Image: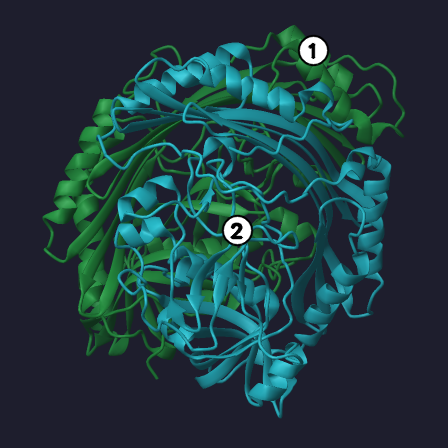
Amino acid sequence: MSTATHSTASPAVGDQGPDHLLAVADRVAGWATSGEEIEVYVARGDETDIRAYAGEVESLTSATSAGIGVRVVVDHRLGFAWAGSLDESVLRETLAEARDNATFATPDEHVQLAVPDGVAAVDVDLWDERLASVPTTKKVELALSLEAQARGADPRIRQVDHADYGDGSVEVALVSTTGIRSSSRKTTGYISVGVIAGDGDASQTAGGFSVGRGFDGLDPDKATDDAVKRAVRLLGATKGPSGRQTVVFDRRVATMVLSVVSTALSGEAVAKGRSFFAGRIGELVGDPGLTLVDDPTDPRAYGASSYDAEGLACRRNVLIDGGVLRGFLYDTVSASRSGVTSTGSAVRGGFSGTPGPGCRALTLAPGPEGFDEDGVLAAVGEGLFVQSMTGVHSGVNPISGDFSVGAEGLMIRDGRLAEPVREITVASTLQRMLQSLAVVGADVEWLPGIAAGQTLAVGDMQISGI
Amino acid sequence: LVIETPVVERVLSSALQHGGDFAEVFAEDRSTSSAMLDDGRVEELSSGRERGAGIRVVSGETTGFAHTADLTEEGLLRAAEAASAVARSGAGGTRSVGVGPLGDQTHGSGGGASGPRTAGTKADALSLLRRADEAARASGGAISQVQAACGSSRRQVLIANSDGLLAGDRQARTRFTVSCVATGDTGLQTGYESAARTLGFEMFDEVSVEELAEMAAKRALSKLAARPAPSGELPVVLAGGSGGILFHEACGHGLEADHILKDASVYTGMVGHQVASPLVTLVDDGTIGSEWGTFGVDDEGRPAQRNVLIDHGVLTDYLWDYLRARKEGRVSSGNGRRQTYQHLPMVRMTNTFLLAGEEDADEIVAQTPRGVYVAKLGGGQVNTTTGDFVFGTTEAYLIEGGKLTEPLRDANLIGNGPEILKRIDAVATDFAMTPGTCGKDGQSVPVGCGQATMRLTGVTIGGTAE
């Protein structure tokens, strides 16, 4: 089993670094009695969040948190417990509670903890050492200047709803009695701005952001320009016409569409009959130009990671190749249930969650060179460009595949963006959208989340408006 | 959760040592447990425990916030020091703070003198889950998958501030959900139903898990024969209960004072104006019974109260938390809420509902020649600045000749708040509430929505049928 223990503790965490977390995890795992397997996930994080408004700091949050999540497997029964503290007494209580929970589960031969599989982890460096030494005053200055820049960017910007700076560092240690021992750490930084453009009585909103591994490299110009351009170009928007159209999804919207599709590629959803992809391996499920890969070992990906949430090495998984469904994403249990091995795709929502299979870094094989946003618009000619999408949670069903979302954007005429539209819906099914994928942009941008942004054109979608 | 009053006073004094207008300690002790049955097996029992405190210091327009899981005086003082950093430029000096009891509220039989009435054991939860699984599967051979979950939480909070307030609350919440998948020639369809109350397990004296399961199964089964939802504008009848989501989105969020004070709501400056049909009297009430959005005191220590927002179509008031009320020289309306001690409070809804009307629900359908009947809404989303919002159906039927005919596949509906509120032309007597989870700025809180069956003269339906 390879491990990637970073022994250099950053100034911000002092003696509370990854080694300390590994020691905590080792100690709890050491409390295992015969006949039981234990997995201990220990995490610790620091964060700073600053919101600027009207030239002042509206709020400044600084916080440290730590916690533990323990899974116990006894006689093929799983129990879980978590706590938001690493105090000695809490660790013992948490283990005891997980053990008690295990006694109530239904025995299931597939329930087991991950076992080292010999796949070497790719060392993805996600830690910006410099973040810890950036003084809060500099972060405050950045938030304030972002707000001022957005306010002054265009006379039609009548309000800056929020201008935020945020950063965080998270360290995780994972130890199990089945031989897993890994630790990882990562830093993140972001700025985000929301603006309101006004023109007479009408208002339009949009946001812009910039993300990175730390403070350096955050780009207020990009965040501001993006927010202002998007809000201003929607001014004058009216409810668009109903009808069938080719829809071009902006990169930010496309990443949301891919994220929803990924839910149906979960090995657990497939094994439990909750995916429209179930039983279709080897079949043509999309346009032959569609190749979809999840590769968390790509260091450019926002969701890049050396290890999955069960401590196995993350790896590149091809899901759809040339339109043909090739595979699903598995964690240890869903893999066993399906008679395959884990694809190193376990994810979990911090110490309070249990692992399950999921994507971290989805991308579509890019289209031909020159297919940036303008190139895709030119290729499409006539249609609707969607710059923002609402109601994904209420109108997209990854089990049935039904897809219906609220949208705003601009009409595409003669291969260019034309008049703005709002208060319309865009509908199809996910199955049909994959088949009708007309153009994949070459303009890959690693956005926050689990999927890259690429301009996408999908044919034959129903628009509902007037 | 015990913090001695003298400790609280010293922490508040310390929080104001560098100046500042207001300081607050919010301490919380929360335990959660959940059990999930999936694929016929009890797969996961989970328990969690989290305790800590968030300390807020307000200095002019700026709020400093820090939180800690360390509830010792030392830990609290460290957090106070961090939160007070924003006031460094302030006058400083020593300010002694005294707090007095405002009363300890108990909600959801979470404790108090009588102790928990019905805490519910893990075995109780499993028995409920099995009953739900059986009932769902017995509803039809096409039911191919059932997932049932039972979750409960107990939350004790203590709030003290430099205005002398000292308040506490104990809240017990229980939630039961059932999700079904039905498989047919047309693919997979889903159905969902839930019950959630601010109660312990005595919720199940009033709620039949079999009925929840049968309802979820019926929704999935009926949609196997569903046709695509229409595309375009039609009259819509919303059944009592979940239709309340319309008000939550179409105006509830837009009436939150944080949006109002930033001029980021279509309802800014509209108090005293006719903003809805005269049939609309809209209330937000955190005091009612054991509804999901009910509590004793809000997360700023203010007792829950009943607020009339729209009276016969006329906008009467907004929703307020401490910070926004203070700016306007008024008092909070009891709507300051936060997800956990790790979050800053914001203006949030509680239970938001339309008062019942006088018509007969069946008669409203009978008098609709053609339209869509929405038996269940799943969720929604709004842009408060433009007023554009979506809400999604999870059970809907076509109305033809005043009768419900064919079932429809899921779709989002889209509208503009101020326009839609004027299109309500009938409200029935069959009032019902429905529980939901409201997300805002990254924080989730439990809320209730409610209304009686009502009709909208026209809404855009985002289906795929031309």
- The residue lying furthest to the front in this view is A118
Q: Where is residue B94 drawn, in percent x and y? A: 84, 14
Q: Could you tell me which residue is drawn at 36 percent across and 61 percent down?
A: A397
Residue type marked 2: Arg
* Of B343 and B6, the residue lying toward us: B343
What residue is pinned by disc 2?
A: A360
Label 2 in the same subunit as label 1: no
Name the spot of residue A373 as percent of width and height, x first. 65, 77
Q: Residue at x 24, y 79 (%)?
A: B369
**Residue A432, numbered circle:** none
Numbered badge on residue B74:
1
What's the amino acid at mark 1? Glu
Q: Is residue B321 above or below residue A174?
A: below
Chain that appears green:
B
Task: Name the image colouring.
Answer: by chain
Question: Is A141 above or below relative to B221?
Answer: above
Left or right: where does residue A98 sit relative to residue B85? left
Q: Is residue B234 above or below residue B26?
A: below
Of all chains, the one bearing label 2 is A
Percent from the top left, x then y, of residue B226? 22, 70
- Is A110 situated left or right of A168 in this image? left
**CB under 8 Å between callouts 2 and 1?**
no
**Chain to which the residue tagged by mark 1 belongs:** B
Q: Please identify the quarter of the rendering in which residue B183 is found.
A: bottom left
Residue B55 visible to an observer of this rendering = yes
Q: CA distance from mark 2 to mark 1?
A: 40 Å
The image quadrant that residue A346 belongs to is top left
Is residue B317 toward the left or the right of residue A458 in the image? Answer: right
Chain colored cyan: A
Image position of A182 with respect to B423: above or below: above
Where's the C terminus of chain B, which quadrant?
Answer: bottom left
